[in-house]
Amino acid sequence: MKLPISLAIAFAFATPACAADLLQVYRDAQSFDAQYAAARASRDAGLEKLPQGRAGLLPTLGLGANRTRNDLDSTARTTGAKTSVDYNSNAWTLTLTQPLFRWQNWAGYQQGALAAASAEAQFLQASQDLIVRVAQAYFDVLLAQETLATARAQKTATAEQLESAKRNFEVGTTTITDTHEAQARYDLIVAQEIAADNDLTVKRQVLRTITGKEADTLKGLKDKLQIGRPQPDDIGQWVASAEGGNIGIQLAQTAFEIAGREVEKQRAGHYPTLDVVATHGKSGTGFSSTGGGGSDSKTSTLGLQLAVPIFSGGATVSRDREAVALQEKARADMDNARRQAALAARQAYLGVTSGLAQIGAYEAGVASSQLAVESNKLGYEVGVRINIDVLNAQSQLFDTRQKLAKARLDTLIAQLKLKSATGSLGEDDITAINALLE
């Protein structure tokens, strides 16, 4: 018993009730994806820049100790008398240093705070990137599944048309040309089915590298899907939001500020430094053959230590020029990041709006293509249409359905990219798209 085309497609697109959804796949990716794990570790490492920078402002405490065996042999030049002395000496010293004025240390502390903030922003960017990558990989699998299902349904429909052409040729109502055309179209669809099956396998493996799990069955989009327009529905507001909240811009601004602190740090190489230095120690010598008993002494000091740089071979001046040049680079990078964010917001907004328009057009195209198939079949039966007309109408119907599915998925991805361009993409956006699945 042969199934109608509509039922064949319905069975092909059907997904089991236990299929995974987008939110579940995203949870799996959070615990498995290597890029996300690397970003988390990088964030943890970057946060340590703050205490490292703060350490330059805090006191340092060090302990030094030594123990020495001394053997001294001396000969007087005038008398030739020889003297031999041997003894042990030991000492330890505890040194406390508190910087009072070290401008490079203060600049380093500010750099550490900025670097820690940058690490947090980079991790947030990686989190948003994970959302887009997971959604893209998920939708790629869905599209590959629909492409394969469409190829199989089209093969079924073409096989029916091939059998019809053979029957009509046997009774003499058509020529052998109809059979050859249907056979050629059937062979082509078989090749397309093989390619679609291979592409689906590849797309599933891509998703597996992110989640660590096989994605045999995934929930697909609802049939009666309504995708809303961006809110606010104004490209100018989205561009302004991107220029103010894009994470790439935030990172570039932070890098520019860090470069400015680096200029201060290198210029501080010309400044004097002032430290409070306190020491406390004890030293002693052991018994010697000539001096008799040993001795012990204790020493404590407290004072200020001033160091004034005078000349370092031009290295300080060179590092100063290097820091200024890198600051200009950071300024240019910041301008570029702002322009790229505005461009990304415009592209994503237009991707959503044009995608919505395409969805409406393809939905109308599916309806008209369906009518064209039915009309051509009827015309073929009464002899006013030939077999190739039916095959072309069927191909157009299946192609339009596939393009409709792709337009829906691309529009949803564009929505995520639009939110990402403004720095506002979050898990709630995944949840909203997940509600569109069945």
Image (cartoon, rainbow, N blue to C red):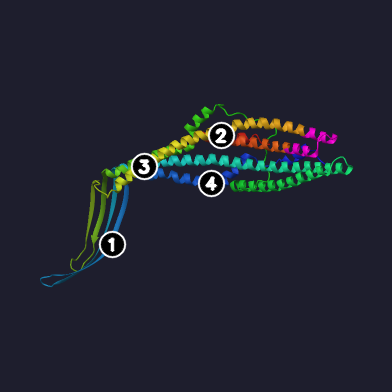
Q: Is residue 340 left or right of residue 321?
A: right
Q: Quadrant of the N terminus?
A: top right
Q: Residues within 10 Å of mark 1 (few under 14, many from 20)?
A: few
- Badge 2 element: helix
- Residue 280: x, y in percent? 26, 51
Q: CA distance from mark 4 to mark 1?
A: 53 Å
- Residue 122: x, y in percent? 48, 41
* Residue 67 disc label: 1
Q: CA distance from mark 2 to mark 1?
A: 72 Å
* Residue 24 disc label: none
Q: Amino acid at mark 2?
A: Ala
Q: For mark 3, what is the residue? A: 325
The front one of 316 and 50 is 316
Magenta residue check for 143 = no
Q: Earlier in the sequence, mark 2 or mark 3?
A: 3
Q: Earlier in the sequence, mark 4 or mark 1?
A: 4
Q: Amino acid at mark 1?
A: Arg
- Residue 205: x, y in percent? 63, 48
Magenta stretch, residue numbers: 373-395
In the rendered image, the vertical position of residue 49 relative to residue 73, given as above or below: above
Q: Earlier in the sequence, mark 2 or mark 4?
A: 4
* Residue 35 disc label: 4
* Residue 348 disc label: 2
- Magenta highlight: main SS: helix
